[in-house]
Amino acid sequence: MNLDLAVIGNCIVAALVDRRGRIVWYCHPRLDGDPVFCRLLAEPPAGEDEIGLCDVVLDGYASATQAYDGNTAVLVTTLSTEAGDAVRIIDFVPRFKRHGRLFRPTTLMRRIEPAAGSPRVTVRLRPRFDYGRTRPSQTRGSNNIRYLSEDSALRLTTDAPLSYIAEEIPFVLDSPVNLLFGPDETLAASLERTMVDWLDRTRQYWIEWTRYLAVPFEWQDAVIRAAVTLKLCSYEETGAIVAALTTSIPEAPDTGRNWDYRACWLRDSYFVVQALNRLGATLTMEDFIRYITNLTAIDPAGELKPLYGIVPSRPLGERTVPWLSGYRGMGPVRVGNLAEQQSQNDSYGSVVLAAAQMFFDQRLPRPGDAALFGRLERIGELAAKVALLPDSGLWEFRGRQRVHTHSAVMCWAACDRLSKIARLLGLGDRARHWRQEADGLRATILARCWNPTIGSFVDCVDGQDIDASLLLLHEVGFVAATDPRYLGTVAAIEARLRHGDHLFRYATADDFGLPDTSFTICTFWYIDALNAIGRRDEARAIFERVLACRNHVGLLSEDIAPRTGELWGNLPQTYSMVGLIVSAMRLSRSWEEAFWRG
């Protein structure tokens, strides 16, 4: 098992499919649900059979190819034998408009077609419940198999012979067969008609969605795939955005750095909103603001947590699942995330920055108004209060707290943006109030987070160390890219954190020791910094080499091993896909420059 995985989904559920067409991860009935297919984290002991997957085994298998069907979330895998037999597997999760609203059933659709010769296949469907612990019982209907436990029920509807699937018997595939797997519900029309209709309409939905993206001239395929992937990481029922679709894929081999990312980090969500806004896909921002509105309504006077469940009223907690061996046997497998209990003060700035465009973008049917500003002011008041208090920081240190520079700067950004919004709304008194708060914070940060001895900003007040988040000082407008202090910071980060083409988060030991892999978004921040300070050619060259680290369908996980280029960490990581989009937009030649001038 490796991270050569493709994602399919519909903004309610998602699944991961490996290069041989095995569905190895599928949480039901939503993105953070029970992984009914959990093979990704269920490495079987030697000699034991695999569990938690949906598989098509081709007799005489020799090779596979896999790609998305154009600019869609429809995946096509072709398995071939040396004798020339081949099958084509088409996987998707339905998403299209029906009866004036989006149709997003929690259903996996799989069509298996003969592509050449007389292929002989075995279809294996091995769902599990309760994170792989419970093997369901089966009952058969006329064209379905129901998988049952005390608490769960799922149904496979198929036009393949049920005995062949239930008993995993090989058969010759001489015509297409269809598998629909999901809720225990009956179909209103024939399976063949439903499959063909839903496949066509899902294709058309994604083609229509991507055609309106404001993509750069260069690297269009990479940007489009990243945008579709970010969209699939949003949970549209509430407006939440998950940091990744998986849990417990380690950041580096055998380190215990295994975390559940199927939750909504306010910080990560801001970066996703920023990237999609650049492409003109503003609906995700509007949905996220709805999520924030409901979140603050739960506890209007309370401090923000750094992350919430995709249904924000439910606490996350954190537990381990000892009966799953983990990715490549590298447990533990964690469910939930204790970072929920941390103080991460940059969250306040992330929320305000994510919402700021609502007030300035004239394309929006419902722009930001005084009511939204009032809710943001309450967040700003908390930002001003905690800006210079110790927290766990954006790297979520579990064993220490400091007054982190990044957190303080993001609180400054909250106050700065509130001043600008108030001025736009004609609220002079509030504009002056927030400007005073912002200016006071900025003066303190400049005085105590700049270290003249090393010629760089540092990671915390009166500190000696650096981290990659300091590259964002220019991004959020705290200092100019031409400021000698920013140039000195970039130089210090290069000297201490760069490993080849990749950037580490920091170079000091944390709760688990020294980091072993680079954090991919940091490399993109470095690329953007190089571009901002005038080293554009160097930035483009590094960007191209980082693009080469994507997997076979264009996805990035959280981390990269600098020496091997291997992907590690949860996948697909929204942070990483965001970095790809933003860097591509900034580095690409303009359409005019490229198309007309050559």
Image (tube, grey):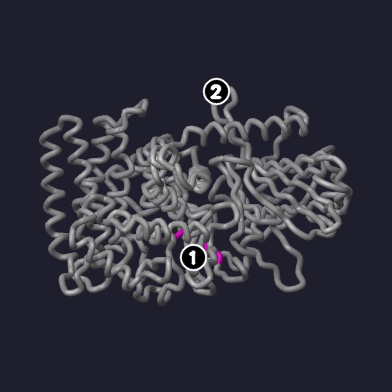
Q: Residue drawn 42% across and 45% down?
A: 313
User: Label 1 is placed on what type of residue?
Assistant: Ile
Q: Tell whether label 1 touches label 2 (CB within 8 Å).
A: no
2 or 1: tag closer to the N-terminus: 2
**Residue 505 in the image, given as x and y percentages of width and height:** 37, 66
Q: Residue 560's mark?
A: 1
**Residue 278 in the image, given as x and y percentages of width and height:** 38, 41
Q: Nearer the viewer, mark 2 or mark 1?
A: 1
Image quadrant in which you'd find residue 526: bottom left
Image quadrant in which you'd find residue 104: top right
Mark 2 Cα within 10 Å, few/some/many (few <14, many 20+)? few
Q: Residue drawn 56% across and 65% down?
A: 333
Q: Nearer the viewer, residue 371 or 497?
A: 497
Assign the C terminus to one quadrant of the image: top left
Farthest front residue in view: 597
**Residue 220 in the image, given as x and y percentages of width and height:** 49, 44
Image quadrant in which you'd find residue 491: bottom left
Secondary structure under the numbered disc 2 in the rendered image: loop
> Visible in this render: residue 236?
yes
In the picture provided, is 59 more to the left or to the right than 245? right
Q: Is residue 479 magenta?
A: no
**Which residue corresponds to mark 2?**
100
**Residue 320 in the image, given as x and y percentages of width and height:** 54, 65
Q: Residue 20's mark?
A: none
Q: Which residues are magenta?
A: 333-337
Q: Is residue 334 magenta?
A: yes
Assign the N terminus to one quadrant of the image: bottom right
Q: Nearer the viewer, residue 350 or 595?
A: 595
Mark 1 Cα within 10 Å, few/some/many (few <14, many 20+)? many
